[in-house]
Amino acid sequence: MFTDSTANAATFAAVFAALWVAHQVGDHWVQTQHQSDRKGMPGWPGRIACAAHVATYTLTALLALAFLTAGTGLRLDPWGVTVGLTVSAVTHYIADRRTPLKRIATALGSARFYALGTPRPGRDDNLSLGTGAYALDQSWHHAWLFIAALFCAV
């Protein structure tokens, strides 16, 4: 029979996997081009686009957890899920507004890495996901998904 710590670890692992998959789907399939193009803009147009993206992203995560629990019989505490998804949503919004993440990278000495692969001014010469900003964005999200999963799995 499983010990409580083994069951807790298994719950965490299942929740993290579900949130990671939901992140990939929510960030790359569910997010609209409109949201992607505007979420980093200054002012209300950017805030609204980012909030819309985070709302659909969070709904995707909630659906992933619903499918996980329906498919496995796993029981999650609603408060833990609420706190976990709130952590995920807030930190996702912070990163996707772009400026905060750039400031954090700069403060930590990673400004050059953040700028890696950025197209030169006036040119579209790096149309890829292979930028430092994207790598830092994704690693930020994954770190916070880890924290979110801990809350969801309590």
Image (cartoon, grey):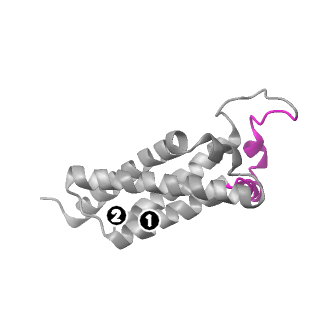
**Horizontal and vertical percent for residue 84?**
44, 65
Sequence-wise, the earlier of marks 2 and 1 is 1
Q: Do the residues labelled 2 and 1 touch (CB within 8 Å)?
A: yes
User: What residue occupies the far top of the structure in this picture?
Assistant: 125
Q: Which stretch appears magenta? A: 97-121
- Mark toward the viewer: 2 or 1: 1
State the image coordinates of residue 69 (x, y, percent, origin top left).
26, 56
Number of the label disc, if any, that sits on residue 73: none
| Residue in front for this viewpoint, 65 or 3 | 65
Tag 2's secondary structure? loop
Q: Position of residue 47 (x, y in %)?
A: 68, 59
**Disc 2 residue crowd, few under 14, some 14–19, many 20+, Cα 10 Å:** many
Quadrant in which the N terminus is drawn: bottom left
Q: For the residue labelled by badge 1, is the local secondary structure a helix, a strand or a loop?
A: helix
What residue sits 66% from the left and 58% below the top? 48
Report which residue position mark 1 lands on. 84
| Circle 1 crowding by C-alpha within 10 Å: few under 14, some 14–19, many from 20 | many
Is residue 104 shown in magenta? yes
- Quarter residue 101 falls in: bottom right
Is there any visible trace of residue 100 in the rendered image? no
The amino acid type found where label 1 is placed reads: Gly
Residue 149 screen position, x and y as percent: 41, 60
> Could you tell me the amino acid type at mark 2?
Ala
* Residue 75 visible in this rendered orientation of the protein: yes
**Residue labelled with disc 2:** 153
